[in-house]
Image (cartoon, rainbow, N blue to C red):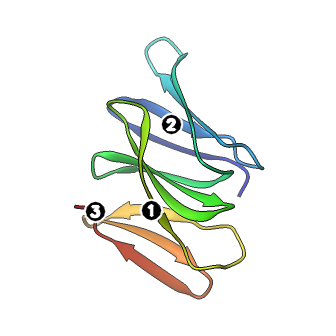
């Protein structure tokens, strides 16, 4: 996957993908960049929900949590080794990540 986008009350979150490690929050009222967050690796997927911004990384293969109130990475969980991409969605009170032939369910605390 070469780009990801999602929206919440804080703005439009954009990850350009394709080896990039940045996530940008755009203010939809002004179309200006409100924040830039550097992930600990190239971003593969992005989803917003459950009070956080979630990204999957290509290398290291991981699920990363970003606090949208501070624009800081606040957690990282390794994912099983698998070829990218790692599609990610928030639904039904959980975070869902596809890895290989499986779908992993994460329920954040």
Q: Residue at position x 34%, y 50% from top?
A: 49
Residue 83 x/y as whole percent: 72, 76
**Label 2 – label 1 distance at C-alpha:** 14 Å
Is 31 drawn above or below residue 105 in the view shown?
Answer: above
Is 70 drawn above or below residue 59 in the view shown?
Answer: above
Name which of mark 2 and mark 1 comes first in the sequence. 2
Q: Is residue 29 left or right of residue 19?
A: left
Q: What residue would you read off at disc 2?
A: 13
**Label 3 – label 1 distance at C-alpha:** 13 Å
Name which of mark 2 and mark 3 comes first in the sequence. 2
Q: What residue would you read off at disc 1?
A: 89
Residue 104 x/y as whole percent: 44, 78
Mark toward the viewer: 3 or 1: 3
Q: Residue at position x 69%, y 61% from top?
A: 59
Dot 2 lies on which element?
strand
How packed is label 1: few (under 14 Cα within 10 Å), some, or many (20 or more)? some
């Amino acid at each position: 996957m070469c780009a990801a986008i999602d929206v919440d009350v804080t703005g439009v979150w954009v990850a350009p993908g394709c080896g990039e490690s940045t996530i940008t929050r755009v203010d939809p009222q002004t179309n200006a960049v409100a924040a830039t967050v550097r992930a600990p690796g190239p971003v593969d997927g992005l989803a917003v929900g459950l009070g956080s911004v979630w990204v999957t990384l290509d290398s290291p293969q991981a699920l990363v949590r970003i606090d949208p109130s501070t624009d800081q990475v606040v957690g990282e969980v390794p994912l099983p080794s698998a070829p990218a991409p790692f599609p990610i969605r928030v639904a039904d009170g959980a975070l869902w990540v596809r890895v290989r032939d499986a779908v992993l369910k994460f329920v954040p605390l």
